[in-house]
Amino acid sequence: MKGIPTILITVSPEVSAQMRPPRALYPKGFKIGNSLGRPGMRDLQQKVLRGALNLLTENTRPGEVITLEYPEYGQQYDPPRVKKLG
Amino acid sequence: MTISRKCVPFTPFDRELVKSTIAIVTAGGVHLKDQEAFNIADELGDLTYREIPPDVDSSQLMVTHHHYDHSDADEDINVVFPIDVLRDLESEGFIGGIAKKHIGYMGYTMQLKAMYEGTAREIANEIDKGSRADAVVLTGG
């Protein structure tokens, strides 16, 4: 099995980081259900997808979630947090 | 082959994006309107997945998933399944092409072992054998 390169776009970076994805992008402040942005914001959706695909070609650290900012998204949301025991 | 949970299964990407074919795999519960919906009545979740063809009309896609607010995806599926956006990037020459097969499944499950050892491998095999994808974009809800 050779494997297939993947890039994850996640809006739950702490939750996703627990699974140690090979490559991952967190578009900062995007809410759950808006992985690529808001409906109809095609320019932003293209920018996020280009940003994600570019991470395939960069020297990222396996298991690390890369945060990129897209201010044109507008209102920002806090991502879900992983509850710590104890 | 069993992969350690401590291992990051990193596959190098040794191609140029402009010559690469891209597939989308989403856990966001996306499927064609004429495909069987995911079973949201089962509290354990649904371990099945749906194949989505590359020439799909995005207006024929829908979401069945009860663990996130998909009202925005109902309005524009590209917010979780960016098939039209991928077409844009192909048109502008950013990527080489769109894979022959894409996958939607419902990421919520209480059957983690079956998802990890069964469904995930089946999806990987679908992409590996039938899609001609050089890389995969993964999205959740």
Image (spheres, grey):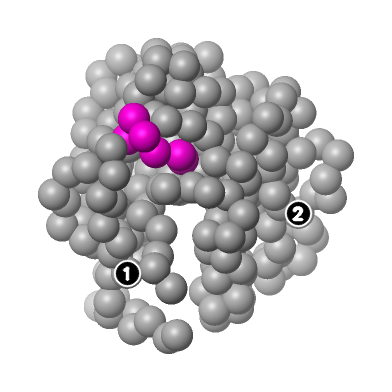
Residue B95 pos. (x, y %): 39, 29
Left or right of residue B20: residue B31? right
B99 or B112: which is nearer to us?
B99
Under circle 1, the secondary element is loop
B94 or B106: which is nearer to us?
B94
Note whether B45 is above or below B6 in the view shown: above
Please state which amino acid type lies under the numbered disc 1: Pro
Note whether A2 is above or below A26 in the view shown: below
- What residue would you read off at disc 2? B38
Q: Which mark is residue B9?
A: 1
Left or right of residue B93: residue B126? right
Quadrant including the C terminus of chain A: bottom left
B111 or A57: which is nearer to us?
A57
The answer for which chain carries disc 2 is: B
Q: Is residue A30 visible?
A: no
Residue B104 pos. (x, y %): 63, 49
The magenta segment: B17-22
Residue A60 pos. (x, y %): 16, 51
Q: Which mark is residue B45?
A: none
Please state which amino acid type lies under the numbered disc 2: Phe
The answer for which chain carries disc 1 is: B
Residue drawn at (55%, 41%), measured in percent from left and top? B99
Q: Is residue B118 visible?
A: yes
Residue drawn at (64%, 35%), measured in percent from left and top? B54
Which image quadrant is residue B81 in? top right
